[in-house]
Amino acid sequence: MTTEEMIAVMQAYQRGETAQYRLRGDGEEWTDMDRCIPGNTFRPNFGKCDYRIKPAERKPREFTVGLIDGVLHHHKPDENRWVCNTPLFIVREVIE
């Protein structure tokens, strides 16, 4: 982490955002700081861990796909703009 990244994480944590950490070389799983530190005191160890502010949760996008006269069309499921002459499929984005 750069010095700027370290400062940004500490300032965001001070504003009340949730900080996360992971041990270097220990995979991709991040742990919320709030769950592991008594009193929620942020005492980073930048030599052994990487830190970040927990990303906002994203809702997967959804859309409907179908054929109209042999042409593939799509739209959001809450829109009722057209009627397909073949079965519809609802597609949901996968977020990892």
Image (cartoon, rainbow, N blue to C red):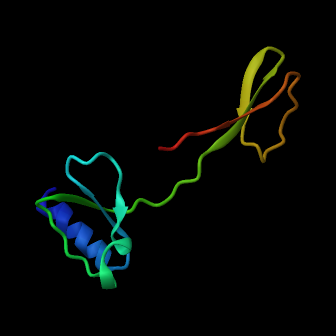
Residue ID at (72%, 42%) = 76
Q: Check the image and name the residue furthest to the bottom.
A: 39
Residue 66 screen position, x and y as percent: 77, 26
- The quarter of the image holding the N terminus is bottom left
Q: Quadrant of residue 16?
A: bottom left
Count of marks, rendered view: 0
Residue ID at (33%, 47%) = 28
Front residue of this view, candidates 16 and 27: 27
Residue 15 screen position, x and y as percent: 34, 79
Q: Is residue 24 above or below residue 6?
A: above
Residue 79 screen position, x and y as percent: 79, 45
Q: Is residue 4 above or below residue 84?
A: below
- Image side of residue 35 versus residue 11, left or right: right
Q: Check the image and name the residue furthest to the top.
A: 70
- Image side of residue 96 versus residue 49, left or right: right
Front residue of this view, candidates 77 and 1: 1
Residue ID at (61%, 45%) = 61
Residue ID at (20%, 51%) = 24
- Image side of residue 85 versus residue 54, left or right: right
Q: Quadrant of residue 80?
A: top right
Q: Quadrant of residue 62?
A: top right
